[in-house]
């Protein structure tokens, strides 16, 4: 199964079990912001996030900064980041 499809399946399964998990929250918010799985996967792995010191979403999650990533994604979702 491709990585993006696996991530979507994981989010759909995990949201019911652990809605407060920052990884699940981040992936769910990212899917809401960017519905195209390929574009979202490219963003997740490659685009630096200035609010996180240039880390990618993947890097933020890998270094335990999932809560900070969720805050950034919530701001984007609410239109508070331009």
Image (spheres, rainbow, N blue to C red):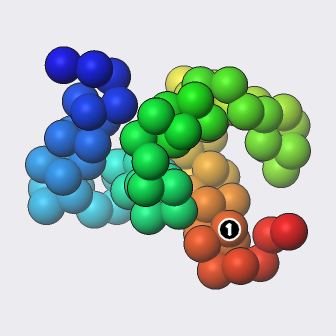
Q: Which residue is mark 1?
A: 76
Residue at x 65% of width, y 52% of height: 68
Q: Is residue 7 above or below residue 11?
A: above
Residue 63 can be seen in this image: no
Name the side, left or right, on which 41 lies relative to 19. Answer: right
Where disc 1 sits, the SS reads helix
* Residue nearer the viewer, 24 or 8: 8
Q: Position of residue 39 (x, y in %)?
A: 54, 39
Residue 77 can be seen in this image: yes
Residue at x 53% of width, y 62% of height: 33
Residue at x 44% of width, y 48% of height: 36
Q: Position of residue 59 (x, y in %)?
A: 63, 26
Residue at x 28% of width, y 20% of height: 2
Name the side, left or right, on which 53 lies relative to 43. Answer: right
Q: Quadrant of residue 19?
A: bottom left
Count up the numbered dots: 1
Q: Is residue 23 above or below residue 25?
A: above
Q: Position of residue 75 (x, y in %)?
A: 69, 71
* Residue nearer the viewer, 26 or 4: 4
Q: Quadrant of residue 42?
A: top right
Quadrant of the image containing the C terminus? bottom right
Q: Is residue 6 above or below residue 18?
A: above
Q: Position of residue 71 (x, y in %)?
A: 64, 63
Name the side, left or right, on which 10 lies relative to 52. Answer: left
Name the side, left or right, on which 53 lies relative to 74. Answer: right
Instruction: Count residues near mark 1 (Cα–Cα under 10 Å), then give few for <14, some for 14-19, many for 20+.
Output: some
Q: Quadrant of residue 9?
A: top left
């Amino acid at each position: 199964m491709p990585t993006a499809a696996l991530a979507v399946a994981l989010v759909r399964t995990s949201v019911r079990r652990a809605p407060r998990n920052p990884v699940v929250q981040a992936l769910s918010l990212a899917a809401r912001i960017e519905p195209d799985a390929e574009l979202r996967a490219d963003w997740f792995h490659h685009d630096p996030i200035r609010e996180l010191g240039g880390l990618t979403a993947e890097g933020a999650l890998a270094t335990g900064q999932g809560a900070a990533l969720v805050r950034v994604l919530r701001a984007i979702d609410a239109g508070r980041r331009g």
